[in-house]
Amino acid sequence: MPIPDYQSLMLPVLKLASDDNEHRVSEVVSALAAQFRLTNSERDELLPSGKQPVFNNRVHWAKTYLSQAKLLARTRRGFFKITDRGRGVLAENVERIDAKFLRRFDEFNAFVGGNNGAPSASPVASPSGEEVLIKSTPDELLRSTIKEVESALASELIERICAASPAFFERLVVELLLKMGYGGSRVEAGRAIGKTGDGGIDGVIDQDQLGLDRIYIQAKKYDANTAVSEPEVRNFCGSLGANKASKGVFVTTSYFTRPAEDFAKRHEYKVVLINGDMLARLMIHHSVGVRIVETLHYKKIDDEFFPEE
């Protein structure tokens, strides 16, 4: 039989997790391959990059979409389990779970962003019951797909950071700022301080070799539902004053409340706030914690090569 598309794999993945046990992704891939009676050649069929089997990739994306809708939850690296919401969906005895079904969940809609809750090139049922493709140009589909892949990557980055230690997060923030060009090209320009710091300062970037111009860092590893409030930003600014500094970067894996943002904007010190979404985007852009697995060349006609008619 043909290799099932990733949306057709969503319900089977969720059903496999219905026993409330922790499941390894690789074991789920094998179980589903047997369930769909895939041949060895179908199991071994690779993506154009030649680096991952097509079926493995589709199971991964099915699991990712279910996780973004909070039907599954990551427990540790390579493992996941069903959530209360996932059990509730299975209790409805639904016949299919796809991107359109997942639109009912706000978290999923936030994940896909501007794609209106559906994969860019996926068929959507029309009122007459016929499947029609979303009307987008190939250029739009390409960019939309890249955006969707990066959204999933950003979400996984924050999950990985939250699962790591506070010390790791502090070192990560320092490395990111160095990759962004702060401190020049000197690796020794940045250092994490952590618990040995003064007044809650977690890291320092020296803009010059003598340390006359410094950027102080605060790094708060919070879960997605815990905001950084104004008092925390106020305390950080107090630490800047105690260190006779005028520049600070406050980084969190969650988000800042509006009063916290307003306080940072009106304070006499230059304080930049970086929330979880911006942190993940900066890490992707500056290749911190991520790597390139494939480079695609997008080509168009060179009009200057051809003579005018």
Image (spheres, helix red, strand yellow):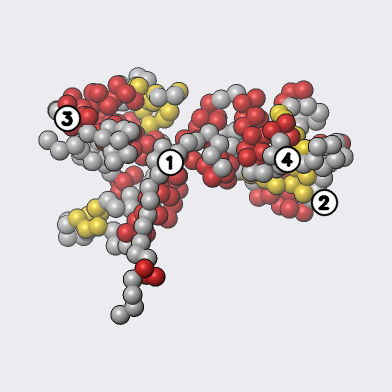
Question: Marks 4 and 2: which is nearer the front?
Answer: 4
- The residue located at (69%, 33%) in the rendering is 187
Residue density around tag 1, few if under 14, some if 14–19, many if 20 or more, within 10 Å: some
Please give the residue where the numbered disc 2 appears in the rendered image: 268
Question: Marks 1 and 2: which is nearer the front?
Answer: 1
Distance CA(mark 1)–CA(mark 3):
29 Å
Apparent side of residue 35 relative to residue 228 in the rendered image (left or right): left
Distance CA(mark 4)–CA(mark 2):
23 Å
Q: Position of residue 248 (x, y in %)?
A: 75, 42
Q: Amino acid at mark 4?
A: Gly
Question: CB of mark 2 within 8 Å of CB of mark 3?
Answer: no
Distance CA(mark 4)–CA(mark 3):
52 Å
* Label annotation for residue 183: 4
Please give the residue where the numbered disc 3 appears in the rendered image: 41
Distance CA(mark 1)–CA(mark 2):
37 Å
- The residue located at (22%, 58%) in the rendering is 132
Q: Position of residue 145 (x, y in %)?
A: 37, 50
Q: Secondary structure at mark 1?
A: helix
